[in-house]
Image: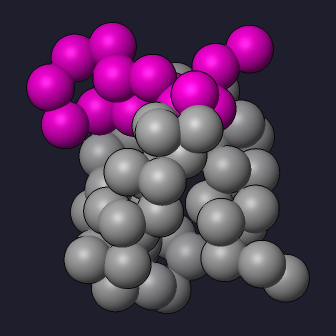
Amino acid sequence: MDRVKEVLDYMKKAGKPLKTGDIAKALNLESKEVSSIIKKLKREGLVDSPKRCYYVPKE
């Protein structure tokens, strides 16, 4: 599975704002990798940050 899709799907299932470290731990990925994926998703307008260091998928 594509890692970007995997991260986005996990965020959607969680249903709450998540930190990159929490996502990395749950998916067994490096925090740096998750951070770069989230940056990419933010540029594409698929993820929002309701408060500092927490991320949620846009509806």
In-image side of 29 versus 54 (left or right): right
- Residue at 51% across, 70% down: 26
Residue at 45 percent of width and 23 percent of height: 48
**Residue 16, image x, y percentages:** 52, 25
User: In the depicted view, which residue is nearer to us: 9 or 38?
Assistant: 38
- Residue 19 vs 36, above or below: the answer is above
Residue 1 is covered by the magenta coloring = no
Residue 31 at x, y percent in the picture: 28, 75
Residue 17 visible here: no
Q: Residue at x 71, y 36 (%)?
A: 12
Secondary structure mostly seen in magenta is strand
10 to 45, vertically: above or below:
below
Instruction: Tell which of 28 and 50 is nearer to you.
Output: 50
Could you tell me if residue 25 is visible in this image?
Answer: yes
- Judged from this view, the residue extending furthest toward the right is 1
The range drawn in magenta is: 45-59
Q: Is residue 58 magenta?
A: yes
Quadrant for the C terminus, please.
top right
> Which residue occupies the extreme front position in the image?
43
Q: Position of residue 18 (x, y in %)?
A: 40, 39
Query: Does 43 sit above or below residue 23?
Result: above
Q: Position of residue 11 (x, y in %)?
A: 61, 43
In the visual, does 53 lie left or right of 4?
left
